[in-house]
Image: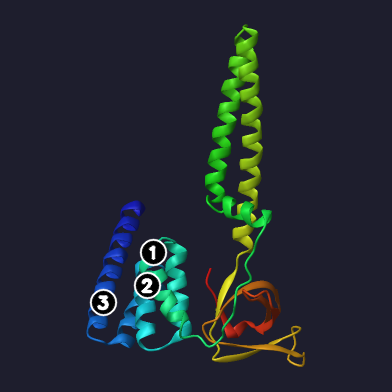
Amino acid sequence: MKNILYIFLLFTQVFWAQNAFEKGNALYQKDKFQEAITEYETILNTKNHSAEVYFNLGNAYYKLNKVAPSIYNYEKALLLNPNYDEAKNNLRFAQNMTIDDIKPIERVGFGKTVDDFTSRHTSDEWGKIAVGFSVIFLLFFVAYYFFSNSIVKRIFFVGMFFALIGLAFSVSFAISEKKRVENDKPAIIFAERMVVKSSPKESAKDSFTLHEGTKVQILETSNDWQKIQLADERVGWISKDALKEIK
């Protein structure tokens, strides 16, 4: 009985969310952007998150020239669907509305190459690859044990060696990618103008100024302050109320 009730409630919630989504779209088409935002946000309040809802919400905020909310919602859409080309395109338009001109520092060298390769797969995918290598290692081990021909045994021994190397690398990449994702804490500045401090206190020296819509990385939290880093690698402390985390 409980399962039937749960399914019924789930179906009702999905149906209601779809209805609100369509209503929001209709309001958007009539240029009633604030009303459309209200409909889309009621969907999110019921935990029915989707890339499409965030994308449409970003569009509505963009039409109202609200920089930070539009960028934030496009980023949320891309978090759920990294291959969402329309969201990528609209995000670029929204970013053109920001005041801060921050030039990212390009990473070069071996470390960047390794990071680029590792990020091609999620930690779970690297874990599955590791399982695959362990199965291959086991098969080669069994074959090495049962075959008596010295040449064949040598081939399987070499295969075991390479499978073991593959297993070690894939496990290492899985751990590295998991740590990278855990340490990745992007946020969007929502305050219209905010002075970044050199330490987590109001009396600290001013480091630089940021404006709404700028994307930062959160490095550390201390009470009501958060240490942030920009794409150009400048760091400083900012009030938690001035920004909104994407993840």
Colouring scheme, one of rainbow, by chain, secondary structure, one colour: rainbow
Between the residue at mark 1 and the residue at mark 2, the CA separation in whole angstroms equals: 9 Å
Q: Label 1 is placed on what type of residue?
A: Tyr
* 204 to the left or right of 154: right
Say which of 116 and 48 sits in front. 116
Nearer the camera: disc 3 or disc 1: 1
Q: Residues within 10 Å of mark 1 (few under 14, many from 20)?
A: some
In the rendering, at what x and y percent does residue 6 appear?
35, 57
* In the depicted structure, whether residue 39 falls above or below residue 136: below
Q: What residue sits right under mark 3 in the picture?
A: 25
In the rendering, at what x and y percent does residue 68 appear?
48, 83
Q: Which mark is residue 215?
A: none
Q: Residue at x 74, y 83 (%)?
A: 200
**Residue with the most extreme front position:** 109
Nearer the camera: disc 1 or disc 2: 1
Q: Residue at x 60, y 9 (%)?
A: 147
* In the depicted structure, whether residue 8 falls above or below residue 221: above
- Quadrant hosting residue 241: bottom right
Q: Which mark is residue 84?
A: 1
Q: Residues within 10 Å of mark 3 (few under 14, many from 20)?
A: many
Q: What residue sits right under mark 2 in the picture?
A: 55
Q: Are marks 1 and 2 in contact (CB under 8 Å)?
A: yes
